[in-house]
Amino acid sequence: MLYFSASSIKDFYKCPKSFSYRRTNKEAAILSDHMLLGTVIHNAIEENTEYEPMVKHALAEWDKLGGTYSETRKPPKSIKNLIKGYFEIEDRIKGTSDHMEMTKEHFFRFKYKDDIMLVGKIDLIANGRVYDWKTGARPPTRYDLHDLQFTTYWLAYRELFKTDPEGIHYGWLAGGRTYDVPMKDSLLRNLDLAIDRMAEICYNRDNEVRVLGYGCNSCLYRGICQLELEE
């Protein structure tokens, strides 16, 4: 059985070797400050419901994880602004209905095909709508809104609730607003092809190829990969 998530699929198509490390040497990952910030903010949102405790949680976790993973120990000034943006979005979501049902961090795991499981978690489901929080400084481009991560969430929602979501939304925390994600059948077909091809290569054990170049700068596994290349 193969277990795929949206991030592992993207890792695979950037560099098959990165995906291989993700499966066999996950502890070797080196997080960038941006990745660490995303982790800290997501955890703070998951564990808290009010602004001050959320900020306190995020700062404490940065101090805890920063010494191990961060390129700099100093917490970014954007933490408070990102959390402020979250509450601006949450207030607008709550204002759309008198009877709001909200579920944070909805985990999913389902059989996509006979030998393939899709796994992951959705940041927020609110009254039939899917939201994913993003901590980037800039608003999304049209390409960001077509990220296959959102298509995976579409499939997960369909599996969980036996219907399509009312909408899928990119939550840009830095700007305190959301963007609608397109829901097109062509995106579902593209994801299906991507998963099939990925599974074929994995079963044939052809996923050891390194795609060396500019992508290495942001790769989580650049450290262990470089060490192996020097052997």
Image (cartoon, grey):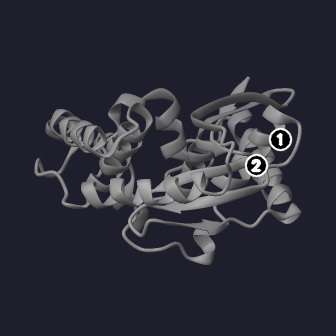
Query: Is 197 left, or right, of 89 in this rendering?
Result: right
Q: Position of residue 82 (x, y in %)?
A: 34, 58
Residue 103 occupies quadrant: top right
Q: Which residue is mark 2?
A: 154
Q: Residue at x 48, y 36 (%)?
A: 22
In the picture of the structure, the residue carrying the numbered disc 1 is 158
Q: Residues within 10 Å of mark 1 (few under 14, many from 20)?
A: few
Residue positioned most to the top: 1
Instruction: Identify the secondary structure beneath mark 2.
Output: helix
Q: In the figure, 42 relative to 86: above or below?
A: above
What residue is at 76 percent from the left and 28 percent from the top? Answer: 110
Q: Where's the C terminus, which quadrant? A: top left
Amino acid at pointer 2: Trp
Res 190 → quadrant: bottom right
User: Residue 39: x, y in percent?
Assistant: 37, 43
Q: Are marks 2 and 1 in contact (CB under 8 Å)?
A: yes
Specify the quadrant that holds the N terminus.
Answer: top right
Number of the label disc, if any, that sits on residue 207: none
Q: Is residue 51 visible?
A: yes
* Amino acid under disc 1: Arg
The residue at 33%/34% (across/down) is: 28
